[in-house]
């Protein structure tokens, strides 16, 4: 789906900032967990997929082959937990081992970062809240806080600041946006 993003400057800034956040987390010995979606070519797990992500994934031929590889610079380091068994759900918790891994390792304070705010990030943040985690969404990783064009910025601010905890980027060297 990377090719579908039209504002390349915004995407490039987000990629650079995201790399800085991961580097800073590693420097501070904060565990970095990677979650990716890997699907089979027939997309059977998505069912009919008439609307939303389940339809868009099929339309764009997403999450197959090379698309399932980690974007350059985001590859997990040896020992970093990686989840690849996603079943097409929007949340990183949906049908994965993320919840059991976090609980079994007594990790209850989490930071959530990603690129598909309106879908995967928001679903993961909501799911984490429902499961009792103290989650923080890293806002403004390159200004992608608005996500899709139809996302109302005020709705995003309300969701992340009032309903969940909207965390600032932990390193001042990362570009910020007006949120």
Image: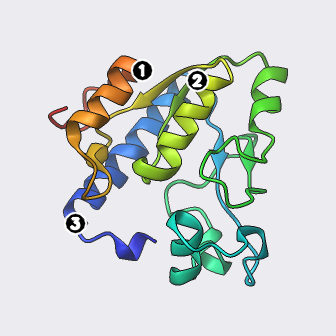
Indicate whether 37 appears above or below 43: above
Residue 142, can we see it? no
Image position of 107 (left or right of 85) = left
In x, y percent, where is residue 68? 64, 69
Mark closer to the chain start, 3 or 1: 3
Image position of 52 (left or right of 76) = left
Image position of 103 (left or right of 167) = right
In x, y percent, where is residue 47? 73, 72
Mark closer to the chain start, 2 or 3: 3
Structural distance between the alpha carbons of marks 2 and 3:
31 Å
Task: State yes or no: discs 1 and 2 in contact (Cβ < 8 Å).
Answer: yes
Q: Which mark is residue 129?
A: 2
Q: Residues within 10 Å of mark 1 (few under 14, many from 20)?
A: few
Task: State yes or no: discs 2 and 3 in contact (Cβ < 8 Å).
Answer: no
**Secondary element at image label 1:** helix
- Identify residue for label 1: 163
Residue at image point 68% right, 24% down: 131
Which mark lies nearer to you, 2 or 3? 2
**Secondary element at image label 3:** loop
Q: Residues within 10 Å of mark 3 (few under 14, many from 20)?
A: few
Structural distance between the alpha carbons of marks 1 and 2:
9 Å
State which quarter of the image contains the C terminus: top left
Residue at image point 44% right, 21% down: 164
């Amino acid at each position: 789906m990377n090719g579908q993003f039209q504002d390349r400057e915004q995407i490039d800034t987000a990629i650079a900032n995201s790399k800085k956040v991961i580097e800073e987390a590693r420097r501070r010995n904060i565990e970095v967990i990677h979650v990716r979606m890997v699907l089979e070519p027939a997309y059977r797990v998505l069912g009919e997929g008439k609307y939303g992500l389940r339809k868009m994934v099929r339309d764009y031929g997403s999450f197959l082959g090379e698309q399932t590889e980690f974007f350059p610079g985001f590859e997990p380091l040896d020992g970093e937990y990686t989840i690849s068994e996603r079943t097409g759900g929007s949340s990183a918790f949906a049908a994965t081992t993320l919840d059991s891994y976090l609980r079994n390792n007594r990790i209850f304070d989490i930071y959530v970062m990603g690129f598909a705010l309106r879908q995967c990030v928001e679903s993961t943040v909501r799911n984490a809240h429902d499961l009792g985690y103290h989650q923080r969404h890293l806002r403004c990783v390159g200004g992608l806080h608005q996500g899709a064009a139809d996302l109302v910025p005020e709705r995003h601010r309300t969701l992340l600041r009032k309903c969940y905890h909207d965390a600032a980027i932990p390193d001042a060297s990362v570009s910020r946006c007006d949120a």
